[in-house]
Image: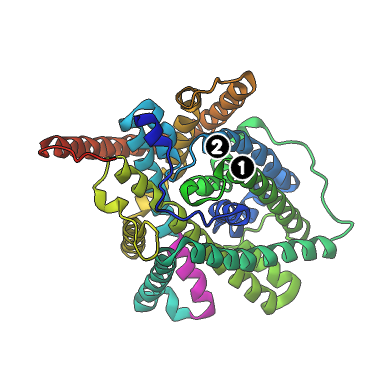
Amino acid sequence: MNDSQDTAPDSRLRRDIGFTGSAFLSFNGIVGAGIFALPATLHMQFGAFSPWLFPIFGLLILLVAMPFARLAALFPQSGGPVAYTAAFGPLASFQAGWLYYLARVTALAANANVFATYAATLWAPLGFGVGRAATILALCASLTAINIVGVRRAIRALDGLTVLKGLPLIALAIWGLAATAGAWPTPGPAPSLSGVEAAALIIFYAFIGFENSVVPAGETANPGRTIPRALIATIVGTAALYFIVQLAYVSAMPAGEAPEAPLVAFASLLAGPAGALVITVAALSSIGGNIAGSLTSTPRITFALAREGLLPRWFAAVSELYHTPANSVLFMGLLGAVLALTGSFLWLAVVSTLARLFVYGTSIAALPRSEQIAGRRTTLPTFGLMSAGLIVCLWAAFQSEWASWRMLLILAAIGLALYLLAQSSSRRKPGPKKTK
């Protein structure tokens, strides 16, 4: 009985997300502010070989995403990692949701600050004081409202933001490649493994966020088919986009320089102030799209935890008017705005990637048990895929410094305390209500 309930989708939620919406959720989860800062760093560290790092790491992240695709087919409900790790029990499910939620809301707050910084390049007062606060509040409030009103409207807004950030990047890359035709650098010798490992988390972070599409599975049409196709297509497409952007940058930009806004500098080199303006708008759209995707996806974590009785039922409320988890969306929007305004989220940023790797690893490790619960047998190819995904997660995680691991353990301990508090509160209640 419990197993069937765990895997049953919530019938109150509308399935408004199709293939395009699911792919755009993953794309906007992956492509945020990173692509506008990473090219210069990689150019300095790896030179002409830097473009080839993206297909290599795209393949590695694909090994992590494919077990997620299998899990999405087994669990056609909202919650993502919360549902997947339930095979290990409620505590593991709570910790996975807790750490994932912290990683996402911290990223939202960080991106809101970056958004204000980019907005200030268009009008300086938006970058400090009241102007900065107003920019952050307006951004968070508008995207929160869109997600409360309905996931269909949120996906439509996401579609527009995706086009605004995707097309300028593609145009910039093609223009740069055309302008440097005949001067494209050869890959050159591959860097040492130790050199790649030193930058692994930076490059890996460029692909993190693909799981955006699995969290709102309960609002996705035919999630068992839609989500796997969207995941694979998005990662392959993003790796290709990163490759051509980096190749164009390396072909045109002088070696040894690292401008703060490398793609703005690149666009300015090609097209002057007009090009810089277009890329600045693309950067704002990219960051806005990342936040919009996060507000569409991540509140389903608190919704799922509350539905399982691991958080107050308030978070599981579904709007009667809009059929969305309105309370969870509102809470994340408010928390993200507060963190962005106070800056207290900064200390969490260093463990964001590590926390995500922990969630990925535990979700993948739960695959055999999840298939057993679903009445299926784990095949040899599935087991091999699961093993490959776990190896990638472990390898990337162990590139972190001890300080990051210590912070992760502290956060996990806080999560454990919250879980025990919720369990204690639940036991003090006179008795659970019976449900049909």
Label total for image: 2
Q: Is residue 352 visible?
A: yes
Q: Amino acid at mark 2?
A: Ala
- The residue labelled by disc 1 is 225
Q: Is residue 283 visible?
A: no
Quadrant into which the C terminus falls: top left
Query: Within the image, what quadrant is residue 335 found in?
Result: bottom left
Q: Position of residue 88 (x, y in %)?
A: 38, 26
Q: Position of residue 334 (x, y in %)?
A: 32, 63
Per the image, label 2 sits on a secondary structure element best described as: helix
Per the image, label 1 sits on a secondary structure element best described as: helix
Relative vertical location of residue 52 with respect to residue 377 in this rendering, above or below: below
- Give the residues in magenta: 111-123
Of 419 and 203, the residue lying toward us: 419
Marking on residue 146: none
Left or right, 25 with respect to 401, comes to right
Prevalent SS, magenta region: helix
Q: Residue furthest front?
A: 436
Alpha carbon separation for disc pair 1 and 2: 7 Å
- The residue labelled by disc 2 is 73
**Crowding at label 2, few (<14), some or many (≥20) Cα neighbours within 10 Å?**
some
Q: Residue furthest right?
A: 182
Of 310 and 432, the residue lying toward us: 432
| Colour logic | rainbow
**Crowding at label 1, few (<14), some or many (≥20) Cα neighbours within 10 Å?**
some
Relative vertical location of residue 87 with respect to residue 119 in this rendering, above or below: above
Of 102 and 141, the residue lying toward us: 141
Left or right, 195 with respect to 345, comes to right
Q: Amino acid at mark 1?
A: Arg
Left or right, 422 with respect to 382, comes to left
Q: Are marks 1 and 2 in contact (CB under 8 Å)?
A: yes
Q: Earlier in the sequence, mark 1 or mark 2?
A: 2
